Image: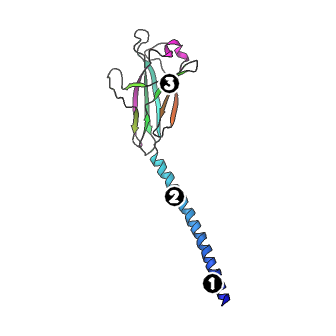
Amino acid sequence: METLGYLIGIATSNISASATVILVIVTAGYVYLTNKILNQMKSQAISDIRINVKDCEYIGDFVIDPNKRHLKLSFDVYNQSPASGTITKPVIVLEFPDNSKQPIESDFEGDLVSGQKTYSPIIYLSGGQMYSKVLIYRIPTNSHFFEVDRKAVKYSIEFKDNLNKERSLSITVRSGDYEN
């Protein structure tokens, strides 16, 4: 009788150990599949908005009419993800030879002739959406820009996405109507 109890104890122990091994394997598979699904959902839930700068130029005549101190930024903005998202309107940053910087925010969207104005501080894009934008920036009269050789000024744009990630791109500015 003792042998029978001993054999039942061993069998129960073996069944319990086997069940534990099977449970560990099932749990590991569940964790793997859950992680895979989570990564897929994450790629669908986070937008990937990019900017492609087409052109940036001076507009107006600095010499004849100093009130026309504008930069016109033309760019394509597109969302590579299926998720909707936003970015802040790009800010043009002037970097002077002494390494000081001056951010300049857009006065309005559109062009100076039509006067089309929108003052929204963000650009919203649905998943996969792309469109072209034109922003106008006025350089303030008190800017260090008017005291230095304009050829020595470096330009960049800065913006943030909806996850508050900061982005920066160097840009080249054409002379447009203004000659150095």
Which residue type carries mark 1? Ile
Q: Where in the figure is residue 83, as x and y percent of width and height?
A: 43, 45
Q: Mark 3 points at which residue?
A: 93
Count of all numbered marks drawn on residues in the image: 3
Which residue type carries mark 2? Thr
**Quarter of the figure with residue 73:** top left
Q: Is residue 78 magenta?
A: no
Q: Does the magenta stretch include residue 150?
A: yes
As drawn, 18 above or below 151: below
Q: What stretch is highlighted in magenta?
A: 127-156
Q: From where the camera sits, is residue 130 visible?
A: no
Q: From where the camera sits, is residue 178 visible?
A: yes
**Quarter of the figure with residue 29:** bottom right
Q: Where in the figure is residue 129, as x and y percent of width and height?
A: 40, 40
Which residue type carries mark 3? Val
In this rendering, position of residue 119 left or right of residue 54: left
Which residue is located at x 45 percent, y 30 percent? 90
The first of marks 3 and 1 along the sequence is 1
